[in-house]
Amino acid sequence: MTDKNKIIDYTDGSEDLRGDLDFIRGSFEEDGLPIPESVSEDAVRSMLDQAGPQTRATSEAPAGSEAPVTADASARSGAGSSGSPDAPARKRHWRAIISVAACAALVIGLIPFLHSVLPGGSSDRADMAAGENGLVAFESYQDLEHELGQIMSDREDAPYGLGHNLALDSEAGAEKNEAIADSDMAMSAAESSSDYSSPDGTDHSQTYNQVEGIDEADIVKTDDRYIYYLSTAENNIIIAEAKKGKAKRVSTVNASVSGYVYDLFVRGDQLIVIAWDSEGQSDGLNKGRIDTNVTAVTVYDISDRTDPRQINRYTQSGMYLSSRLIGDHVCLVTNQWVDSQLPEESIPQVSYSATGLQDLPIGDICSFPKITSPTFTVVGLLDLSAGTFSKDTVKTKAILGCSDEIYCNGENLYVTGSIPSRGAYVLGSGYEDADSEKNADTADTDVEEIYLPELSMDWKTQVLKVSLSKGKVRCQATAIVDGSVNDQFSLDEKDGILRIATTSDVDGTDVNNLFLLDEKMRELGSCRGFARDEHIEAVRYIKDKAYVITYEETDPLFIIDLSDPANPVIEGHVKISGFSTLLVPCDQDHMLGLGFSTETAEFGEATDGVKLALFDISDPSAPAVADSKEFPDMYSPVQYEHKALLVGPDASYYAIPYERYSDDWLEDDIAIAEREGFAEEDSAEADGNYGILVFRAKAGKLETLQDLETRGTVSRCVWIGDYIYGICDDDTIEGFRLK
Amino acid sequence: MSMDERTLIIQAAAGDADAFCRLYGLYRPKLYRYAFYRLGNGPDAEDAVAECVLSAWKQIGQLREPEAFTAWLFRILSGCCGRLIRQQIRRRDQQTEQMKEAEQQSARPGQADSDTWMILQEALDQLSDKDREILLLSAVGGLTSGEIGQMTGLTAGSVRSALSRSLKKVRGYLE
């Protein structure tokens, strides 16, 4: 292969990305761009003097303020007078704040992690400590605090140990785990079918969920009359009544959190809002903790849509990862990092209906045997049918160990977390044979250099299986498989067997794998090393088949037969240009792929728009491309987020929000404007660069039905009856009647 | 984040305008650079930075986590740039080719054509606005993919794959 045809390496975790990023950062730093005086510090100072006062949420200083804030600091500034508690609430940008808090968690969590991933000192006693379910229990809070302290001090004592292996080698610990495992197994054997019924869906759309009947929280929800959506600008939830293509706001739900709202569910007359909060801090209940990042689930009674009333509230430690609505229960997964300064004060906490945060009972806290990032995964299961939240109606467990993705089929929850293999390349530290002293310093001080742990080359995935049946949270088993998962669609469970697809690194080359694990998470069979030099972009499982999209130059769809779990076999594959990032089963014989079209540029392959591909999968040994369509210069959130896909009634159509960015259309529009002399008000319409694309996949053909242009960027679209509504970034809703 | 910067953030949040200006000084090149490359011209970039700074000053009292400052600031700037981009599109619709050319000329800060920033600008022209935003937040703002994901509504993994593609594209152009 010549250089010209060299294909871009799209691997998430390769050193290439790091190298490219360093190169581009360097280019920006030495770009010689002159910075005008109009944005000098002096200019800004005079601007501030003319500006109005600050908006203050409360009069207190930011969390964790270690530096003294003198009283005259606020008095000195003319603008400081706004510290009064009655300052009006204004538009806030909490989305960023929370993201950074998450990031800070990540970076702080990463520092000891960076020290601990490389080969060295600590002995591997984990096997002795772990119970049958693979988890380590704690005898007491003192045990836990000791271990947390140990994890943190490891960075000084033995900075290059391979992970932190929990040293709990007491026999009591092991026995306890066996007991936990036994009781868990007994429970799981008794429950083979799901207790949960599927939500109804009649004359309105639902979020595009991975598992039918298991709802995933999103920024927009609908029923047959109302649209509920998150307003980023207002940081609250708007309820709008949709009628014949028009939507009218009927009420606004103030999320009453100090952070920002992530996601929501609607369950009949209940609105469930998931948000970041810092409850402990504002209520003075946090026992002096620095970290008070908690995720709050607030339930509102919306039987009167014009007057929503808060009825229940639960908070748990950590930053939001994901959630599911399973019948009457909400399953909430968060990540709480261990405070490097006060590891002994990092015990996960919960609060029920403003009872104040309290430590989780020690019996509800356990640990993965191998810790690479000192972060707790906290799993809460809330019974929404309960009158109030309490320890009886909300079950919470915390597991020491970080998590990235979740898959939930209602009965079981699988949580995956990345852990590095020996010899991993770690950003900010370099390769393992690099000078250790230097790296130790780097990891401590040069936080900006640390990007994300997943960027190391060689990873394994730690999987935890948690049973959610009967409204209880029970840790069942753990397993470690080679490689990293692409997203939640990489996992699936059928007949108690977990199927998980990963991309791993073998001698610097990507290969792909599919593993089948039994109920106790022992490997039954695997299909390893396929699609060499490519990586997984999308996976879908239907019955006994896995459909896997890998990508490097072209987009092969692999069909893998899983009917013999001990011996999964690749049955067939087909290639097509571009690549899909989401696979959607259309009918028995067809699979729709949504993703990117690509073009060959001088330096390799590059994405250039949206691509739809329809695969004929009727003969698994010889899949074929039935049809495909490309939309150059188009971007759609569905390329990254499956929830952006709208499926029409009985899959009669599909719709995706899009944006078009093209110099060509600008030129065209200018030419038209010149020729036809558009007035100013017309030009806005002539933009035509946002909208909703409605298409059909029927009888092996893809057909564009409608291109609905909108005034602004559409984040999600929903349907109610004969109308499609686009929810725009500026909080407006545009409705269209389907032709 | 250095202790000094942390202190400045806390003081600025408490209403200290001097501290805020010193803090701004630390971020000025990054902010202007981000806005310039996102918007493609100097005057719009100046407007975006000014709007962002004022907005940040008015809201910094609400900032609880000093560590959150960088991403918070870029979130504001990103919003300001987004608004200006829409204005730009409308404006361009009204313009003739000559006017457009003239604007581009005036947009250049008056340096030799061989300057890196010009080549960088051309390289970034190949990207969609979304991809450009992601790349700039990472390469100029220094934000992590997790932060960028929260800002753009994408998962960290999606951000990384988008970023990986864009970096390749831009690097290919520069080399």
Image: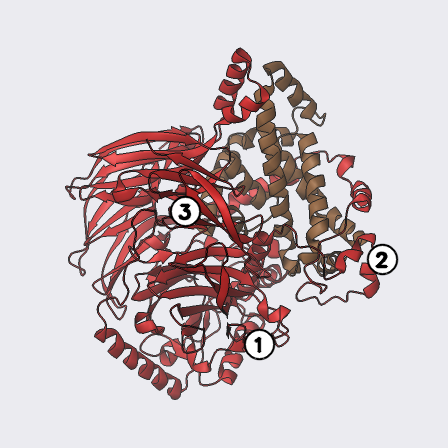
Chain colours: A red, B brown
User: What is the quadrant of residue A243 in the picture?
Assistant: top left
A726 on left or right of B43: left
Amino acid type at circle 2 is Arg
Chain ID for label 2?
Answer: A
Spatial distance from mark 1 to mark 3, Cα to Cα?
A: 36 Å
Name the residue nearer the viewer: A466 or A2. A466
Chain ID for label 3?
Answer: A
Mark 3: few/some/many CA within 10 Å (<14, 14-19, 20+) = some
Q: Secondary structure beneath disc 1?
A: helix
Quadrant of the drawing holding the N terminus of chain A: top left
Amino acid type at circle 1 is Glu
Q: Secondary structure beneath disc 2?
A: helix
Q: Nearer the viewer, mark 1 or mark 3?
A: 3
Where does the image place residue A297, in percent across and percent down from the top left?
48, 64
Asked if residue A531 can be seen in this view, the reply is no
A701 on left or right of B117: left
Q: Which residue is under mark 1?
A: A345
Q: Which residue is under mark 3?
A: A641
Residue located at (57% from left, 61% from top): A256
**Pointer 2 and pointer 3 on the same chain:** yes
Amino acid type at circle 3 is Glu
Extreme residue toward the top, this view: A675
- In primary-sequence order, the first of circles 1 and 3 is 1
Quadrant of the drawing holding the C terminus of chain A: top left
Q: Nearer the viewer, mark 2 or mark 1?
A: 2
Where does the image place residue A390, in percent across and percent down from the top left?
45, 76
Q: Which residue is under mark 2?
A: A76
Q: Is residue A219 above or below residue A293?
A: above
Name the residue nearer the viewer: A89 or A33. A89
- In primary-sequence order, the first of circles 2 and 3 is 2
Mark 2: few/some/many CA within 10 Å (<14, 14-19, 20+) = some
